[in-house]
Image (cartoon, helix red, strand yellow):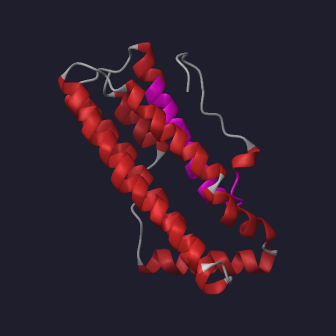
């Protein structure tokens, strides 16, 4: 991300994991961060404690929902497509570190900064870097597996995923909801 108000987190085909819904979520996460960054940078974000908490909460919920869905896909790849148990465990562990350490510290830091009048803009940088790095490296492993699936095997994956979602739904939040919430912070 840079200090100008244009898209600095750009989606490229090299970030694709070869599953449209996960790709769309990755795009949305990068857009969420970039949109927030641009609003902070342009001075169009009223960085009150309440507004920061509201936007952080939304970003956190969207992130949690995405990571949960990605972990479901990893479980299905492990259980039905011979994807490495160790790789899945490592991937999930890195998700947990992100949830606990990076997002946890981000929340604490941004709230402390809000009390001192700082908008916390520089705190978005590690979040953005983690996402781009994670998609390019960690997600690349399962992306290669997904890319190699035959249409029949891909359909099997979707059937397992739908079954998983029917048994344990994930609450979905979307980019449009984030934009609406962000507009309310001006």
Please tell me whether residue 26 belongs to the stretch shown in magenta: yes
Q: Position of residue 96 (x, y in %)?
A: 41, 61
Q: Which residues are magenta?
A: 16-37
Name the quarter where the C terminus is drawn: top left
Residue at 58% over, 80% down: 85
**Quadrant of the image occupied by residue 18:** bottom right
Taking depth in this image into account, of 180 and 168 the one nearest to the observer is 168
- Residue 39: where, in percent of width, then height? 43, 22
In the drawing, does residue 50 fall left or right of residue 144?
A: left
Give me the residue at 39% from left, 44% from top. Answer: 59
Image coordinates of residue 68 in percent, x first then y, are: 45, 65
Compared to 132, does 180 lie above or below?
above
Residue 169, above or below 23: below
Question: Can I make out residue 138 in this image?
Answer: yes
Q: In terms of secondary structure, what is the magenta stretch mainly?
A: helix
Q: Residue at x 40, y 21 (%)?
A: 40
In this rendering, position of residue 34 left or right of residue 102 = right
Q: Is residue 167 above or below residue 118?
A: below
Q: Is residue 30 within the magenta segment?
A: yes
> Could you say where residue 63 lies in the image, as x and y percent from the top left?
44, 52
């Amino acid at each position: 991300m840079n200090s100008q108000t244009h898209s600095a987190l750009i989606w490229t085909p090299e970030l694709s994991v070869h599953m449209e819904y996960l790709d769309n979520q990755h795009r949305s996460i990068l857009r969420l961060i970039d949109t927030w960054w641009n609003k902070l940078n342009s001075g169009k974000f009223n960085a009150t404690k309440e507004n920061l908490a509201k936007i952080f909460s939304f970003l956190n919920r969207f992130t949690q929902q995405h990571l949960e869905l990605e972990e479901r896909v990893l479980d299905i790849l492990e259980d039905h497509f011979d994807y490495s148990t160790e790789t899945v465990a490592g991937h999930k562990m890195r998700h947990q570190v992100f949830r606990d350490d990076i997002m946890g510290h981000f929340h604490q830091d941004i709230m402390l900064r809000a009390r001192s009048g700082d908008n916390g803009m520089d705190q978005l940088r590690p979040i953005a870097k983690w996402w781009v790095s994670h998609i390019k490296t960690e997600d690349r492993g399962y992306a290669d597996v997904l890319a190699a699936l035959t249409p029949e095997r891909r359909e099997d994956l979707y059937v397992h995923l739908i079954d998983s979602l029917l048994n344990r739904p994930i609450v979905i939040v979307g980019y449009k909801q984030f934009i609406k919430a962000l507009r309310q912070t001006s």
